[in-house]
């Protein structure tokens, strides 16, 4: 990594504080249970103030799951083309944006926690919805610059076309996660979506 790309001291300290809070939240839940784990118990364990906690997480549930607000790096849109496999491009874009909300988190432990406390899944769904909204907004912008792709779709505007495209592109991702070959420890790589995308295209041709 070049010196210009290396994280600053402030960025490293923020990352360390984030990890300390996340690990403290998980340790607290494993020791005391989710209901008895409080933000105070988490911050005491991490050695930071409750005010600091809310600079990193909006709730103890997000701290336990290790969730961040998803982000869409503009670099991910470079090279996007409506001339080839739009579904695959949007599926992989959605995977990248959704993954930004839990980068570096122990997926096996997180799955174990959601099994033990099923209502935590609702927070995961909310973060996934946020990721989908980010991708939808970006795709709507790309469509606005390429109106010919959405031509012939009736009165639907670019927002509607983007919304249905993103919803459709999420199907191969969810199918892959639900498959028996998915490993939470390994996570998903863009190439892992290949079989699901191929199957989707085959089914789509039959349906149409």
Image (tube, rainbow, N blue to C red):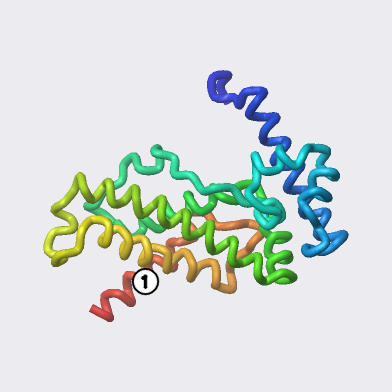
Front one among 177 and 130: 130
Which quadrant would residue 88 be assigned to in this image? bottom left
Task: Pick the residue in front: 131 or 45.
Answer: 45
Q: Which residue is mark 1?
A: 200
Q: In the drawing, does residue 125 fall left or right of residue 138?
A: right
- Residue lying at 81% horizontally and 48% vertically, measured from the top left: 40
> On the picture, is 20 further left or further right than 156?
right
For the point 58% across and 26% down, which residue is it? 1
- Is residue 15 rendered to the left or right of residue 42? left
Above or below residue 170? Residue 80 is: above
The residue sitting at 67% across, 43% down in the picture is 54
Q: Position of residue 161 (x, y in %)?
A: 26, 61
Q: Residue 202 in the image: state x and y as whole percent.
A: 32, 74
In the picture as drawn, the residue positioned furthest to the right comes out as 31
Other residues around mark 1 within 10 Å, as few (<14) / some (14–19) / many (≥20)? some
- In this rendering, the answer to whether 101 lies above or below 20 is below
Q: Quadrant of residue 52?
A: top right
Mark 1 lies on a secondary structure that is helix
Residue name at image x 82 percent, y 54 percent:
27
* Quadrant in the picture for the C terminus: bottom left
* Residue at the farthest front position: 51
Q: Nearer the viewer, residue 35 or 11?
A: 35
Q: Residue furthest bottom?
A: 207
């Amino acid at each position: 990594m070049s010196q210009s790309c290396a994280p600053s001291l402030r960025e490293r300290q923020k990352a360390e504080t984030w990890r300390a809070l996340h690990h403290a939240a998980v340790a607290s839940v494993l020791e005391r249970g989710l209901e008895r784990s409080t933000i105070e118990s988490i911050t005491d364990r991490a050695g930071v103030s409750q005010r600091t906690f809310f600079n990193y997480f909006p709730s103890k549930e997000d701290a336990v799951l290790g969730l961040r607000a998803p982000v869409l790096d503009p670099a991910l849109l470079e090279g996007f083309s409506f001339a080839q496999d739009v579904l695959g491009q949007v599926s992989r874009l959605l995977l990248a944006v959704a993954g930004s909300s839990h980068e570096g988190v122990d997926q096996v432990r997180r799955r174990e926690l959601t099994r033990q406390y099923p209502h935590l899944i609702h927070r995961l769904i909310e973060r996934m919805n946020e990721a989908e909204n980010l991708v939808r907004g970006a795709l709507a912008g790309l469509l606005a610059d390429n109106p010919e792709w959405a031509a012939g779709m009736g009165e639907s505007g670019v927002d509607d076309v983007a919304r249905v495209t993103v919803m459709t592109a999420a199907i191969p991702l969810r199918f892959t996660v639900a498959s028996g070959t998915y490993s939470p420890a390994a996570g998903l790589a863009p190439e892992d979506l290949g079989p699901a995308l191929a199957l989707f295209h085959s089914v789509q041709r039959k349906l149409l």
